[in-house]
Amino acid sequence: MKERYAGILLPIAALPTAWGVGSLGEEAKRFVNFLARAKQKVWQVLPLVPTGYGDSPYASSCAIAGSPYLIDIDDLIQQGLLTAEEAEAYSCAADGEGIGRVNYEALFYRRIPLLKIAFSRFDRKTPAFEAFLAKGEYADFAAFMAIKEAHGWRALSTWEEKYRVRDKEALGAFLAAHEDEVLFWQFTQYEFFRQWQRLKDYANARGVEIMGDMPLYVSEDSAEVWAHPELFLLNGDGAPTEVAGVPPDYFSEDGQLWGNPLYHWEKMKEDGYAWWTARLQKALSMYDIVRIDHFRGFDRFYAIPAGSQNAKVGRWCDGPKESLFEGKEDWKIVAEDLGILDEGVYRLMRNVGYPRMKVLEFAFDGNPDQEFKPSNYDSDNCVVYTGTHDNATFIEFLQDLDEETRETVYRDIASECKKANKRFCYRPSQLADAQTMQRAREATVRLAYGSYAKYAILPLQDLLGTGAESRMNTPGTLSDRNWSWRCEAADLSNTLADKLARLVKQANR
């Protein structure tokens, strides 16, 4: 059998820290130590970009920027840029006992002012910072954020026209008059990537690779749309003519209306998709592996008339297909190929050769031919998950089923265990008697580890056996429960790490 790997999906924001949100500091290193002890070779994170509408990392103000919220405050204290008292005064930690959820409203109002205090003491003549500025990689982001702040954080579409259309004279005058603000946003990127590289080096040195996550689309209110409007399908006023989403299906009668502007693929083709190539290269310089969300959109994408209230009305349009990935077949990319699939998507997946995704919450429906069942994997070129950040935790998934459907799931799990390695997976007799949900979850973890999939990457919640309270996101909803779950330090115990290490060894991962 080819070499196979185990990993854990946990957003950095979900790490336990004293400051209200996970960061790139010591807690992240401790999690790497946990992964190493547990014999996990991959840490999958969610997008590290600034969060946007609905606190989502999939609706960011910049596709290549790092979130200022993730900058380690303790590191800034150690540099002498902040005092512990200042950090405490601007803390976003929850009141009362427990680590608490991420409070994005508190982060918005407190974290940026705290970082500005740090910047006020930062030596701008630091050679490393000057070299960072000279590269110019985040000049557009810094200008965009400074202008956005000057407009009361309103969306790009509401800005004064001279700034919205990047009038050269007006933009130059603004940047000259707001040099400190622009440099501050450059500072956030300098600190983020300095800390990020340190963390990545630490993980790699301990045998842990990091899998990043790239959303297919960018936000309408983003530095990319502002700086490169010609690459998107916009009207004369700079507004989208059609927007992204997916049509109605079994899970949603209204479909999903994401609202992102669509790419002008014909324009992008003129220079060989240079913007996309640069974006992918940036991601692969940050991460060891990159998962691309909604990969099917490269084959065909769903276009919804701008201003629609739902995704019921739309049309399918051709994407760039394989042409975007010519010469990139050996890049370390994972394709999120879930959703409405057809022969075009299957052909694209075969031609690019990237690993696909298999989600076990979709596997146990009583259909013996279900492609997500481990016994039906026709290749090891895939990544198996119990669920993703958009799914219920496995315990919540079971709790939400009616009794008859739950029994079907139980029978399917038992059947899969029978087909799997009998020394590693549960015997059907152990699962047959109206088993508990936790036993079913444990069996599913073992099925993932025992499968042929090259990677078995499981959300931490499904290794802990937690329920609805720890769900990361519910698509199509706006709630302070989305993106805000955090684990406790006690969750990352040596007991759990040693148990996972034994499972890895037993499964030959």
Image (cartoon, rainbow, N blue to C red):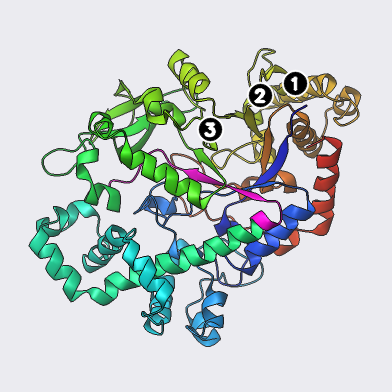
- Per the model, the C-alpha gap separating discs 2 and 3 is 29 Å
Say which element carries label 1. helix
Residue 186 % position (x, y): 35, 67
Q: Is residue 401 visible?
A: no
How many marks the image carries: the answer is 3
Could you say which is closer to the camera, residue 304 or residue 328? Answer: 328
Residue 128 % position (x, y): 43, 72
Residue 259 occupies quadrant: top left
Say which element carries label 3. loop
Residue 131 occupies quadrant: bottom left
Q: Quadrant of the C terminus?
A: top right
38 to the left or right of 179:
right
Q: What residue does disc 1 label?
A: 412
What is the span of residues highlighted in magenta in the rendered image?
204-222
Is 214 contained in the magenta span?
yes
Disc number placed over residue 363 in the picture, else none = 2
Disc number placed over residue 330 in the picture, else none = 3
- Per the model, the C-alpha gap separating discs 1 and 2 is 8 Å
Pointers 1 and 2 in contact (C-beta within 8 Å)? yes
Is 297 contained in the magenta span?
no
Say which element carries label 2. loop
